[in-house]
Amino acid sequence: MTGSLFVQSIGFGLVTASILALASVGFTLQFGVSNILNLAYGDLMTASAFVGYAVNRAGGGIAESLAAGAGFSALASMLLNRYVYRRFVRHGTKLFGMVVVTLAVGIIVQNILLGAYGATFFSYSVSSGKQVHVLGMLFDTSQLMIVGLSVVTMGLVQLLLTRTRLGKAMRATAANPGLAQASGIATDQVTDLAWLISGALCGLAGVVLVLNTSAFQSTTGNDFLVIIVAAAMLGGVGRPVGAMIASIVLGVVTEVAAGFMSPSFKEVIAFGVLVVVLLFRPAGIFGQGSTVKEVPA
Amino acid sequence: MSAAFSYYVTTILVYLGVDILAVWSLNLQYGVTGIYNFAWIMFQAVGAYTAGVLTLGPATGNGGFEHYILGLQLPEPLPLLVAGVVAGALALVVGIVALRRLRTDYQAMVMLVISVIAVLVVENVNGLFNGPAGLSLVPQPFGSLPLSSLGYQWFYVALTAVVCLIVYLFVHRVTSSPLGRALRATRDNEEAAQALGKDVVRLRLFVFVLGGAIAGISGALLIQFIGAWSPGSWAYVETLVVLTAIIVGGTGNNAGVMLGALLVPVAFNEATRFIPQFGRPGLVDAMQWIVIGMLALAFLWFWPRGIIPERRRRFTGTPAASVQADLGEVA
């Protein structure tokens, strides 16, 4: 591979990393606050992409599609947690049962989309804009938009978690729900807000994912789930900063490696990185020890 | 019975046998021991592929339209046994990486990711098991027997039944023995089991390998019956079908999960086969998956212990005697 191609693949890597960061931070937040590994996440991304698609077809631009996708997913995720996941947990469903519940919900969402839209591919009608050179890397303006959106969103999430009372309450709820409640934190409302925010990230990720890949179908989000899970685990599940850094690592590594071999091996490479890391640090790079948390009732 | 109906019945019976092996295998891992094996379908697939390439002739045969490794044309029951061994060996490797140090929720995720990755590898490495198209024209075992084709169907039903019986004796022996008690202790209270001197990791690894081997054998039986196996047959969601069968039948109960195998994969998939296709292509399939998801949710909510729940075990005899018995069996 020539030098310029190498630099270019780093550029692609940054775009992939931006999408991955949006997705994996939302995924990891849900686990952090509710202790739920939400396997329906990828399918909600697809659903958001279809919502954005509907807005786009109705004449909306990228901004409107993004807003619609994020808004839909925020609401859907919050309701899903409040009326399905949390109820199952309070009903006594344990950790493994919860994974099955999320998987079942994902299958249902995915197949409703399949039934409604069929197995054909869809794409947004937007122009990818002029091509721009940045540090020897060539980007479409839409790709730059994705990177910018991701950087700004990540900054906002980080500020929210570290600098606001809400963020503090979220972190307290994640660390010890019982103690948080005893300290006067309305954990149910905090959890709802956390799912609204993570849901919005999920929706943004869904729309930018299909903007970048240009064609999508009912399984697109779920296909991306594996890399999301890998990034979340690599960063230590439940740790947003870890997920951001892991996203950059996985995004760049997979795109550069895809330059050397078939692009279909991207996930395999991501997985290889994950396994090697987990062999040495079983809780991920930024995970804390091997404390087993049960689902809080 | 008309010939067509006999074909139908025999085919269903073979599927039932394969699905029963499947639920016993995953029940041993998940139901009895509490291992979150979301990669279960991969072990069945490995068994199927192994049996396939061992039964098929060299890849240059059939005009060389398939690409795969080996092609040894081994006689039955070698492919069946080797399939079990290879799947068990893969389970050992996966188990050593995933079960040794990882948190249980991480284990579930790693398994899921492994399952997806395995499909990608098989699809993209064309020379391994013929890529996305998969293996086909796999010869049926004991093809030289002087049987009519319907007679052969019944013969295969008998073969499946024999395999099921042997596996059952094995599984039953494990679950009803002191070893089974140690496995359930591992599932219910890991720390307590450890405190009693049980090597939890080794117990889990043992069950993971045993379950993997059974999964491999079930895959081998299936590919030798239907003659083909491709990446489409082992998407990771297929594990959800087996899991749903276990949850419906009764997690941890060998008889219960058998009922689950009869109800979920067999009755459900076969019964709906005759629903006339309507709407856009794939709509009926999509609805099938939606119902499977609903079934899993409904049972987890209303009957989490399944139709035939696991028997509650009680101590009989004096505590001192049972402690002595336990001490005698510490592995």
Image (cartoon, rainbow, N blue to C red):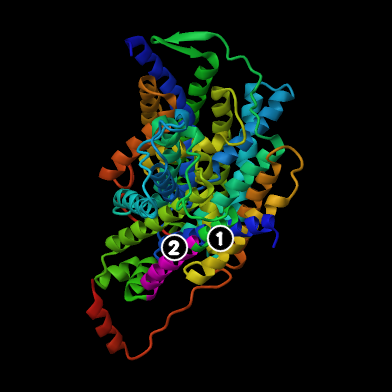
Q: Nearer the viewer, mark 1 or mark 2?
A: 1
Instruction: Name the foreground residue: B307 vs A31.
Output: B307
Which class describes the residues within 10 Å of circle 1: few (<14), some (14-19), or many (20+)?
many
Q: Which residue is mark 2?
A: B163
Q: Can residue B188 be found in the magenta stretch?
A: no
Which class describes the residues within 10 Å of circle 2: few (<14), some (14-19), or many (20+)?
some
Residue in the picture at 50% in, 53% down: A99
User: Residue A15, position in %: x, y?
Assistant: 46, 23
User: Residue A52, position in %: x, y?
Assistant: 65, 30
Residue in the picture at 48% in, 61% down: B159
- For the residues labelled 1 and 2, say whether their Cβ atoms are less than 8 Å apart: no
Label 1: element kind: helix
Q: Is residue B66 visible?
A: yes
Residue in the picture at 32% in, 72% down: B179
What's the amino acid at mark 1? Answer: Trp
Chain assignment, label 2: B
Q: Which mark is residue B270?
A: none
Instruction: Name the foreground residue: B42 vs B240.
Output: B42
Label 2: element kind: helix
- The quarter of the rendered structure image containing the N terminus of chain B is bottom right
User: Residue B299, position in %: x, y?
Assistant: 60, 63
Q: Is residue A178 visible?
A: no
Residue in the picture at 50% in, 43% down: B229
Position of B291 relative to B327 (above/below)? above
Instruction: Name the foreground residue: A184 vs B271.
Output: B271
Magenta-colored span: B159-176
What's the amino acid at mark 2? Answer: Val
**Mark-to-mark CA distance, 1 and 2:** 14 Å
Position of B64 relative to B225 (above/below)? above
Q: Which residue is mark 1?
A: B154
- The quarter of the rendered structure image containing the C terminus of chain B is bottom left
